Amino acid sequence: MEVEKICWREREGIRYLIFPRFEETGLLIHAFTSRPLDLGFGRRPREEILRNRKRICQILGVNFLYLTSGEQVHRAEVSTVGREDKGRGALLQEGAIPRVDGSVSNVPEVPLVLFTADCVPLFFLDPVKRAIGLAHAGWRGTLAKAAGKVVSQMREAYGTRPGNLLVALGPSIGPCCYQVGEEVISLFHHRFSDGRRLNLWEANREELLSEGIKEENIVNAGMCTSCHSDIFFSERRDGSPTGRMMALLMLKPEV
Ligand SMILES: [Zn+2]
C-alpha cells in the first residue's frame, strides 16, 4: 500500500508536517514547521523567537532548552552530536555549533534542529543502528554534497548501511521557482536545470542515490516554499529578512 509522503498536524492553531515513513518506525519525534511561527534567530526579537520555540516544543513534547543547532554557513561540514552538545544554540545563535550545516547523533532526547526558508532540509534515519541526521542544503550546500557528507558521517560514526537509511526532503524552493544566475548553473555543469532555474530536489536525490540510498527510501515532500505563501516563509519570495521554519528530529528514549 502506498504510504502518504507527508501528513499535516495541527495543534493549538500551530501546523507542522511529518513524514509517515519516519513516524511509523516509532523511533523518533520529528517535524517541519510552518508560518507564521518564526523560529530562527536574527529577524525578530530574541524573546519572541524563544517564545515561539517553547510553544512548538511543548506541542511536540520536546524540551526547548535542548534544541541543538549548527551555525549554518552554506557549506557541508557535519558535526557528530553527543550528549554534551545538547542545547547548543537553543538560547543564543552564538551558542550554535560553529561552521556546520549538518549534524548526526545516536543519543536519545537530543533534538537536532535547523532553520530554513527555501534551502532544502534533509532528514535521515537509520532505524537499524538507531541514528539520525539533518542536513541544510541550499545551492552551495548541495554543490558541496552536504547530504552525502551526512551519510558518510553516519557510516563512520554509527556503522550505518546506506541501504537501511530513510531520507526525507522537506519543503523548500522548487524547480518551479528557483531562478539562479548562469554562474550557478555552470557550477552544476548545466545539470538539474532548465537553463534558468535549478532543481535542488533532483540534485539532492541524485546525490543520495550515488551514496547508496535506495530510491524507495527517499521521500520528497515536493512542496515549494515560494509557491505556498500562506504556509511557508520564502526568502526568495518575501525578500530578506523573512522568518525561518524549523526542521526537528529527535530519537525517543529506548524502552
Ligand atoms: Zn514554486
Image (tube, helix red, strand yellow):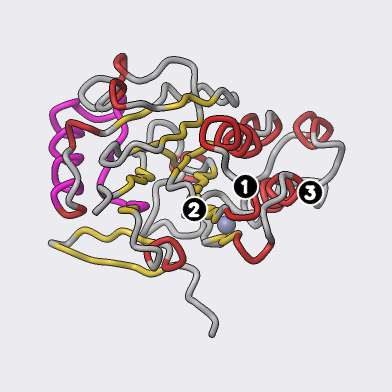
Q: Earlier in the sequence, mark 1 or mark 2?
A: 2
Residue contact between numbered discs 2 and 3, judged by CB atoms under 8 Å: no
Q: Earlier in the sequence, mark 1 or mark 3?
A: 1
Residue pointed to by mark 2: 128
Residue located 47% across and 40% down the image? 133
Q: Amino acid at mark 2?
A: Val
Q: Residues within 10 Å of mark 2 (few under 14, many from 20)?
A: few
Q: Quadrant of residue 191?
A: top right
Distance from Cα at disc 1 to Cα at disc 2: 9 Å
For mark 2, give the secondary structure: loop
Q: Amino acid at mark 3?
A: Ser
- Residue 193: mark: 3
Of badges 1 and 3, nearer the viewer stands: 1
Residue contact between numbered discs 1 and 2, judged by CB atoms under 8 Å: yes
Q: Can you say which quadrant of the picture contains the N terminus?
A: bottom right
Q: Position of residue 169 (x, y in %)?
A: 54, 53
- Residue 161: mark: 1
Q: Position of residue 86 (x, y in %)?
A: 27, 27
Q: Residue furthest right?
A: 189
Residue located 34% across and 68% down the image? 8
Q: Is residue 104 shown above or below 42?
A: below
